[in-house]
Amino acid sequence: MENPSHSSTSAQSDEELFRQIFEHNSAAIAIIEFDTTISMVNDAYCTMGGFKKEDVLGRSWTTQIPPE
């Protein structure tokens, strides 16, 4: 059986690795929830879209589509 403290440490390491890859990626990345709200974006997303994080987090991604 796996040591619970080792499992917790491993999960923390995995989460930190994900965050590092997410934040330092040159591709625009957004995490979008089932209800269409944006819960995370990286700096590349903001730069490419001309957004500030505080302006997009918690809002629906559909508000970023220009009208036809």
Image (spheres, helix red, strand yellow):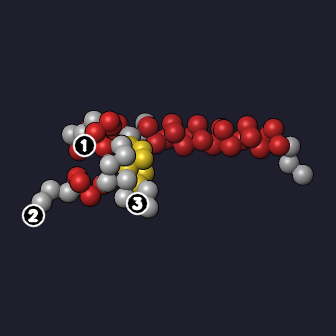
Quarter of the view holding residue 56: top left
- Counting from the top left corner in percent of width and height, residue 52 is at 27, 35
- Counting from the top left corner in percent of width and height, residue 66 is at 15, 56
Residue found 68% across the figure and 43% down from its top: 11
**What secondary structure is marked by label 1?**
helix
Q: Is residue 39 visible?
A: yes
Asked if residue 16 lies left or right of residue 58, the reply is right
* Cβ atoms under marks 3 and 1 closer than 8 Å: no
Asked if residue 36 lies left or right of residue 48, the reply is right
Residue at far left of view:
68
Residue found 33% across the figure and 37% down from its top: 53
Q: CA distance from mark 3 to mark 1?
A: 24 Å
Q: Which residue is mark 2?
A: 68
Tag nearer the camera, 2 or 1: 2
**What secondary structure is marked by label 3?**
loop
Tag nearer the camera, 3 or 1: 3
- Counting from the top left corner in percent of width and height, residue 50 is at 21, 40
Residue found 38% across the figure and 50% down from its top: 38
Task: Give the vertical position of 55 relative to 37 (above or below).
Answer: above
Q: Which residue is mark 1?
A: 48
- Total marks placed: 3
Q: Residues within 10 Å of mark 3 (few under 14, many from 20)?
A: few
Between 33 and 29, the one nearer to me in the picture: 33
Residue found 23% across the figure and 44% down from its top: 49
Task: Give the vertical position of 46 relative to 61 (above or below).
Answer: above
Asked if residue 60 lies left or right of residue 66, the reply is right
The amino acid on which the numbered mark 3 sits, given as a three-letter code, is Asp
Task: Give the vertical position of 67 relative to 4 (above or below).
Answer: below
Q: Which mark is residue 35?
A: 3
Q: Earlier in the sequence, mark 3 or mark 1?
A: 3
The amino acid on which the numbered mark 1 sits, given as a three-letter code, is Met
